[in-house]
Image: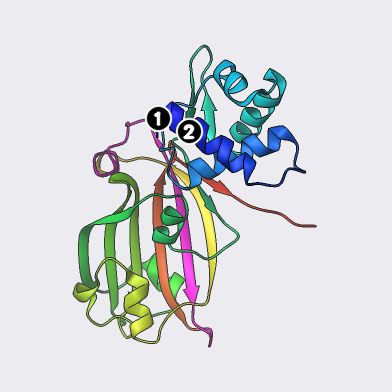
Amino acid sequence: MNEAALLDFIRGHIAGGNGAEPLYRQVEMALAEAIHSSRLKRGAVIPSERTLCAALSMSRVTIRRAIEDLEADGLLHRRHGAKTVVSSRLEKSLSTMTSFSEDMRSRGLEPGCIWISKETGRPSPTEMMALGISVADEVARLRRIRTADNTPIAIETATLPLRFLPRPAEVGDSLYQALEARGAMPVRAVQRMQSTPITPEESRLLEAPPQTSLLVMERRCFLEDGQIVEFTETKYRGDVYDFVIELHR
């Protein structure tokens, strides 16, 4: 979306919105909608404060407040002495149980994956503890790179008791579609998060700088009857991903 089209979009959004909202809030909502709908892509430059003021007939204070709020929300990034751009960082809510694909599509990004392996085997000690199984049990293990708009974002390893996924090679782009077809769709999850340095191999797979930190999310998923159906370790690029927790009182 070029500058003229964006200004027209903002004017139209304001004209069709709630006139009772403060002016800065109307501008903020218009820009947020342009970002969430992918009219403004990650890294896109937004018009300067001076341009927005003139085009929308609003004060510098109003425009600056809208931009500052969007920056605080992580949607915009303002570099010192440079232009304001749509943030390249992604957010992951920890308060809802959503798939990677759902997260990406909700942000107007196209999810994808690059398969590394689909195999069966014996569980590791960590997988045994996470899934509540013994060394004699077999597991299905799926490893892939998760992408957003073809950019590598995370390395995901999902491990499941083989009774829930006896033929892992047949899984397509969606593990949860395969589980749903077998009546084994998880209904709740417990997550644990930590950070870890990136290894040379992970740096290569994620096309990330060697000094990048990884945000590691471990998730155990449960069926309605309490059975553990899945243990997934996802290593997110810390330079492009944020985790967000919404708290209520």
Q: Nearest the camera: 88 or 137?
A: 88
Q: Is residue 118 above or below residue 181?
A: above
Which residue shows up at 44% across the image and 33% down it? 5
Percent position of residue 113, x then y: 27, 56
Which residue shows up at 55% across the image and 18% down it? 51
Using the numbered discs, state the Cα–Cα distance from disc 2 to disc 1 in whole angstroms: 6 Å
Contact (Cβ within 8 Å) of mark 2 with mark 1: yes
In terms of image quadrants, where is residue 45? top left
Report crowding for label 2: few under 14, some 14 to 19, many 20 or more residues within 10 A (C-alpha).
some
Q: Which mark is residue 6?
A: 2
**Visible residue check, residue 74:** no
Percent position of residue 249, x then y: 80, 57
Secondary structure of the residue carrying numbered label 2: helix
Q: Nearest the camera: 86 or 246?
A: 86
Q: Of the residues shown, which amino acid type is indicated by label 2?
A: Leu
Magenta segment: does it hold 213? Answer: yes
Q: Which mark is residue 2?
A: 1
Q: Is residue 223 above or below residue 4?
A: below
Q: Of the residues shown, which amino acid type is indicated by label 1?
A: Asn
Which residue shows up at 68% across the image and 18% down it? 60
